[in-house]
Image (cartoon, helix red, strand yellow):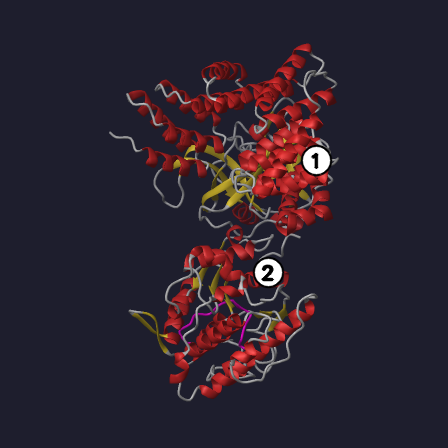
């Protein structure tokens, strides 16, 4: 059978755009099987396009497998080898990446473009190694830092147009100074930053800069302590067509991890909330904030959303995005982890009692899944109310016991349990419940707030595509690991629409449609409320 | 769930789907009413093809909502004026009123914009002479087009003119547009939740005409008119039988509120923007007029109206939605 590469690309792009990783993986398997059977070398251009599609949505595991298969077919493109190495870096396989990159540097000696890119990636491996270690006093780490600077700076020295190498050298040299690590033999970071910014300012006079150049200019301004200018470049960057979730995540990582910008001091106080709010608004955006830092992030987002300087630069739409992000952070204060003395079991969230029944008034209750907490002996794996410990990591790690299970609906029904806590956590603002669900038109996005994988001490706000709904179920898909059971599901206005309860690679489709798909499933909150009201006996 | 039947106004438009998307997007922008998020379905009563050769290109769509220039540059065919025996006086009166509303709006805009030339003296009332256009801040051809387009659309609808916008297509304008409006409202009536009509410009005349005067038209829960010329006597006269000052509210088919939103400097609504007094129910004023100030020289466009806080609040109210979060 002949292989239609244009058709394949289209299908892969559709799957990736719909966050359908299972379908993307199936398509990649198909491609790999085709590559392994075929005597032909896959053409370089479509091969690169395929890798580009996978990279854009951060499907690095798939990218690595496909790149590996391309290389097995004796595809000798340097760029494919480089992307292969990059996918390994992004998955933390640093040693394997170094081996590939060193071989590539040798092979591409006659190709200045590819050689420069590969050497830059070697710098990136060292940079990651240094940042991950977090111990500047270690002699080994100091050597790693030096190697990282050298890898970037040497490329920049040979060709001053290679600005991403230059700006990384700046960031690392500045970091070395802050960490008290002596890295000799290189210019002062501010000198390099001045030079880079001058180059970019001149380029900007000739025409619009691509996204990465704008991010580089913002970073150079950060290096020079020109906060307002950094913000100006950042705003241009977020408005640039080439800036998507992938680019924004990379920039945020660089500013947080390498530049160590903080949200309580400038320039981080302006840049970080702006970038985070933009990231969460992009398709597939995900924000992870350490639970202990949510309150601070909320305070900073609140300050930023009232800043007159930001208003001037960002305009109404940008400020609206900031306020929207702040509301999302506010909602995360409602989210708690449900655990035993030894392990995390699931998530739950505060709801306003009177939404369930007027008699509860302003009392706050906790909603979670029945498969997390239940008093029904048939639900064997659930915690019994007396065993459950409710931990509000975002509210100074406050822990509460459950005093009463008010109502439960079994896991194979609405999978919901409403609990009364021994005390009311302070600092949480009630939020509205949506009267209707978003349109199932393939365009709507819903947001899950939870603890990724139920283990990390962080709160994650995930952008999800709403696939379909049929009372009482909602199906949606996330680009990343889903929130744990019992997380709240919000609509784009941050009104509560559901209780997350399950995810499956082979979820049966709704509304009588044939077949299955990879999806997460939530229960519509209005159905839970209705059922509760019908069954509740005061 | 709720449903909105939209109906657009004068001037050519992009095809129906992009136009509906643009309207929904305009309402959602800047933290507005995101109909997708709220689960609100909608449809657009599209009638631009009854009057125009072909739709605007999609890329011109945004502009069509935002700029007076989207009225186009090519001359409007006004040969119909010569064949409208008996309508001349009506047409001349309407033209004069529209013109004076436009002059007033431009004069006030000019006063509000320091640094720009002072407002021109008002031109003689009555005819659409080129002399009068040249004194206006907006390019004369823009004004000419606005006047002619509005005159033609209102005239052809109210007088149910037989019109051929392109070879092979000919419509009795009112019959055709009424049919389309009815189909859309019947479809909306079958949806769950409240169903309301949101109309703009000439679309408000069509919506009112159908809701007040067409017995087969289903009932709706609410009506919003935006940038509306229903205050003009010449329009009201042609909505009889049906309209009267004391019983002009379309109570037969509008069960809830009618909210009318205008900008005093919108030339289409500007001559008589307040409707409450003219569309009473049992002699009582029940209609709510909202004065929402837009920005810029051209105050009639729908995207500016849709950005208004008062309009958005009123729309939420008509739809029975919770108030905005902040």
Q: Would residue A423 be counted in the magenta stretch? A: no
Q: Which mark is residue A240?
A: none
Label 2 secondary element: helix
Disc 2 and disc 1 in contact, CB within 8 angstroms: no
Residue B307, percent across and down? 59, 59
Residue at horizontal 65 percent and vertical 35 percent from the top: A198
Q: Residue at x 48, y 45 (%)?
A: A472
The quarter of the picture where the N terminus of chain A appears is top left
> Which chain is indicated by disc 1?
A
Q: Residues within 10 Å of mark 2 (few under 14, many from 20)?
A: some
Same-chain check, marks 2 and 1: no
Q: Is residue A38 left or right of residue A225?
A: left
Mark 1 falls on what kind of element?
Answer: helix
Q: Which residue is identified by label 1?
A: A268
B89 to B319, vertically: above or below? below
Residue A333 visible somewhere in the drawing: no
Q: Is residue B226 magenta?
A: yes
Local crowd at mark 1 within 10 Å, few (<14), some, or many (≥20)?
Answer: many
Report how far apart the C-alphas of labels 2 and 1 lie in the structure.
35 Å
Q: The residue marked by circle 2 belongs to what chain?
A: B
Majority secondary structure in the magenta region: loop
Residue A251: percent from the left, percent from the top? 60, 32
Residue B86 picture location, percent across and down: 42, 89
| Quadrant of the rendered image containing residue A402 | top right
User: Where does label 2 land, which residue?
Assistant: B312
Q: Please indicate, yes or no, whether residue A272 appears anywhere in the rendered image.
A: yes
- Foreground mark, 2 or 1, reads 1
User: In this picture, is B222 found above or below A49?
Assistant: below
In front of the other: A84 or B8: A84
Q: Position of residue A103 (x, y in %)?
A: 47, 14
Q: Which residues are magenta?
A: B214-231
Viewer-closest of A8 and B107: B107
């Amino acid at each position: 059978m002949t292989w239609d590469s244009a058709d394949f690309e289209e299908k892969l792009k559709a799957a990736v755009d719909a966050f359908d990783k299972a379908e993307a993986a199936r398509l990649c398997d198909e491609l790999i099987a085709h590559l392994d059977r075929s005597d032909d070398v896959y053409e370089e251009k479509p091969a690169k396009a395929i890798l580009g599609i996978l990279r854009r949505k951060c499907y690095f595991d798939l990218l690595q497998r496909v790149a590996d298969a391309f290389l097995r077919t004796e595809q000798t493109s340097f760029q494919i080898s480089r992307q292969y190495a990059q996918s390994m870096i992004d998955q933390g396989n640093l040693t394997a990446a170094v081996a590939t990159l060193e071989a590539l540097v040798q092979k591409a000696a006659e190709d200045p473009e590819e050689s420069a890119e590969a050497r830059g990636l070697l710098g990136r491996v060292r940079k990651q190694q240094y940042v991950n270690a977090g111990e500047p006093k270690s002699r080994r780490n100091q050597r790693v830092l030096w190697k990282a600077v050298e890898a970037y700076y040497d490329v920049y020295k040979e060709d001053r147009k290679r600005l991403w190498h230059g700006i990384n050298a700046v960031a690392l040299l500045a970091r070395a100074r802050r960490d008290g690590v002596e890295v000799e033999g290189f210019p002062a970071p501010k000198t390099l930053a001045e030079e880079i910014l001058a180059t970019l300012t001149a380029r900007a006079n000739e025409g619009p800069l691509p996204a990465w150049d704008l991010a580089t200019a913002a970073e150079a301004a950060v290096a020079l302590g020109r906060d307002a200018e950094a913000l100006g470049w950042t705003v241009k960057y977020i408005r640039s067509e080439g800036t998507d979730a992938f680019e924004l995540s990379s920039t945020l990582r660089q500013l947080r991890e390498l530049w160590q910008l903080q949200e309580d001091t400038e320039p981080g106080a302006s840049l970080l909330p702006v970038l985070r709010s933009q990231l969460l608004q992009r398709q597939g955006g995900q924000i992870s904030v350490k639970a202990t830092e949510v309150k601070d992030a909320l305070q900073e987002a609140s300050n930023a959303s009232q800043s007159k300087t930001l208003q001037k630069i960002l305009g109404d739409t940008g400020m609206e995005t900031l306020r929207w992000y702040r509301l999302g952070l506010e909602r995360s204060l409602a989210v708690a982890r449900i655990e035993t003395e030894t392990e995390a079991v699931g998530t739950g969230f505060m709801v306003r009692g009177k939404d369930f029944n007027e008699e509860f008034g302003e009392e706050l209750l906790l909603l979670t899944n029945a498969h997390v907490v239940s008093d029904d002996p048939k639900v064997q794996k659930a915690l019994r109310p007396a065993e459950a410990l409710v931990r509000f990591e975002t509210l100074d790690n406050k822990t509460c016991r459950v005093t009463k299970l008010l109502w439960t609906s079994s896991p194979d029904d609405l999978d919901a349990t409403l609990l009364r806590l021994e005390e009311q956590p302070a600092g949480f603002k009630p939020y509205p419940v949506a009267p209707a669900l978003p349109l199932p038109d393939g365009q709507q996005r819903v947001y899950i707030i939870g603890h990724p994988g139920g283990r990390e001490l962080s709160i994650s706000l995930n952008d999800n595509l709403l696939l379909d709904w049929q009372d009482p179920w909602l199906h949606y898909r996330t680009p990343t690991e889903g929130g744990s059971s019992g997380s709240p599901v919000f609509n784009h206005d941050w009104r509560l629409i559901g209780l997350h309860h399950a995810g499956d690679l082979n979820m049966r489709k709704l509304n009588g449609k044939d077949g299955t798909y990879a999806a997460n499933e939530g229960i519509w909150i209005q159905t839970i409320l209705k059922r509760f009201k019908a069954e509740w006996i005061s | 769930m709720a449903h909105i039947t939209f109906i657009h106004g004068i001037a050519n438009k992009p095809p129906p789907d992009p136009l509906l998307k643009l309207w929904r997007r305009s309402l959602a922008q800047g933290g507005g009413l995101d109909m997708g998020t709220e689960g609100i379905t909608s449809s657009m009563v599209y009638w631009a093809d009854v009057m125009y050769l072909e739709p605007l290109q999609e890329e011109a769509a945004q502009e069509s909502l935002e700029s007076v220039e989207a009225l186009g540059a090519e001359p409007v065919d006004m040969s119909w004026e010569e064949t409208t025996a008996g309508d001349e006086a009506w047409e001349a009166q309407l033209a004069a009123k529209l013109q004076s509303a436009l002059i007033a709006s431009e004069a006030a805009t000019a006063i509000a914009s320091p640094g720009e030339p002072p407002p021109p003296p008002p031109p003689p009332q009555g005819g659409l002479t080129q002399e009068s256009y040249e004194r206006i801040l907006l390019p004369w051809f823009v004004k000419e087009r606005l006047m002619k387009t509005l005159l033609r659309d209102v005239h052809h609808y109210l007088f149910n003119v037989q019109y051929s916008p392109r070879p092979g297509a000919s419509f009795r304008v009112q019959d055709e547009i009424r049919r389309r409006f009815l189909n859309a409202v019947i479809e909306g009536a079958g949806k769950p939740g409240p169903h309301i009509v949101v109309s703009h410009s000439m679309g408000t005349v069509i919506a009112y005409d159908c809701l007040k005067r067409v017995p087969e038209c289903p009932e709706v829960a609410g009506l919003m008119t935006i940038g509306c010329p229903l205050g003009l006597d010449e329009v009201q006269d042609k909505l009889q039988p049906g309209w009267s000052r004391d019983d002009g509210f379309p109570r037969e088919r509008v069960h809830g509120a009618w909210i009318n939103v205008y900008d005093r400097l919108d030339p289409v609504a500007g001559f008589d923007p307040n409707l409450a007094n003219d569309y009473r129910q049992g002699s009582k004023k029940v209609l709510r007029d909202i004065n929402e100030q837009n920005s810029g020289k051209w105050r009639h466009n729908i995207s500016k109206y849709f950005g208004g806080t008062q309009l958005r609040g009123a729309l939420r109210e008509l739809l029975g939605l919770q108030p905005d979060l902040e």
